[in-house]
Amino acid sequence: MEDLDWSKLGFGYRPTSYNVRCYYRDGKWGEIEVCSDEYIKLHMAATALHYGQEAFEGLKAYRCPDGKVRLFRVEENAARLQRTADATLMPQVPTELFVEMARKVVRLNQQHIPTYESGATLYLRPLLIGVSPQVGVHPAKAYLFLIFVTPVGPYFKGGFSANPYVIIRDYDRAAPLGMGTFKVGGNYAASMRANAIAHSKGYASEFYLDSKEKKYVDECGAANFFGIKNNTYITPKSTSILPSITNKSLMQIAEDLGMKVEHRPVPEEELESFEEAGACGTAAVISPISHLDDLDTGKVYTFGDKPGPWSTKLYETLRGIQYGTVEDHHGWTSVVIE
């Protein structure tokens, strides 16, 4: 195992030993290639560089207290990438190929998987790009699918703790019928300026209202939003929100714990009625929101300086399933290394 203090890892790129690659040419996927090179040789007119034929995913491998290494809902990531591929006219990566490559890259890099006690994980980044040249807006004829890994710590400093967010109205992450429901790089480029503004003002992240009317809650930066009141888990329904696998899991866990679940439009004024609120996603898992500031109106929505009881229970249950310490009733995890 790599010799470092895993508990001090931040969320960033750190080199590992291998990545896995597969090319799509002449209408079919080729053989899986194992590579130690961190770089890609890419044509200067590749569609990924000019016309946004690029999609990615994010998932984690967990070293568990029973000594096994598990992946969480890997088939869901494969399905979401397939949806994004359809939207960007790229070939679907078959689920079997996606899963085989994910398992292979974890096994190849097992010395880089953090210890259970550290709270860190091995992050997998599947990437699908158009690699053949085009001058003119047309899909590529050749594609590359690769997965690299890197060990990561908590997305936010302090891990599972409450953080302040700020409503940003001057920038939109995605249009209502645009690419917001797909995991493409352009959505993240669109959020960088708002995110930088939020950070410069001392907030953990920006908070978006819907881009059409600015009346409804959309997302917390690059994560889904949820609010809790009256034993009910409420999360926005919108045509510009990425369907989070973490949020989908939390909705099921909330039902399992006896909560009601509502997936519906959430008007901004409803924010003041929530007892707890948070952001959720693969990177952050759950990031409780301490308070949400609306700088345009001066309104402050307060949810508590510490994670609330329901947020804590949801977090502990999800993490327990991922680490194999809570029974996985839904078959979400798969053992990669015994």
Image (spheres, rainbow, N blue to C red):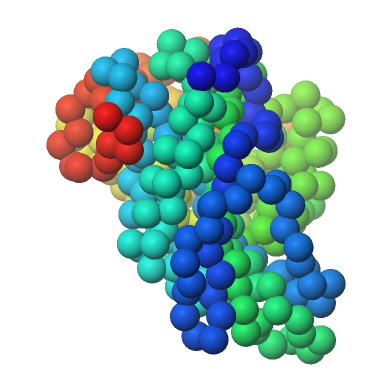
**Residue at 79 percent of width and 72 percent of height:** 43
Q: Is residue 128 left or right of residue 331?
A: right
Does 311 appear above or below 136? Answer: above
172, 333: nearer the viewer: 333
Q: Number of callouts in the render?
A: 0
Would residue 249 be visible to someone looking at this image? yes
Residue 93 in percent (x, y) is at 45, 68
Q: Is residue 123 left or right of residue 211?
A: left
Give the quarter of the image for residue 325.
top left
**Residue at 67 percent of width and 34 percent of height:** 15
Residue 256 in percent (x, y) is at 18, 35
Q: Is residue 322 left or right of residue 82?
A: left
Residue 37 in percent (x, y) is at 69, 48
**Residue at 28 percent of width and 36 percent of height:** 335
Give the quarter of the image for residue 63.
top left
**Residue at 40 percent of width and 29 percent of height:** 62
Would residue 282 be visible to someone looking at this image? no
The quadrant of the image that shows the C terminus is: top left
Q: Is residue 2 left or right of residue 308?
A: right
17, 222: nearer the viewer: 17
Does 249 appear above or below 170? Answer: above
Residue 142 in percent (x, y) is at 62, 79
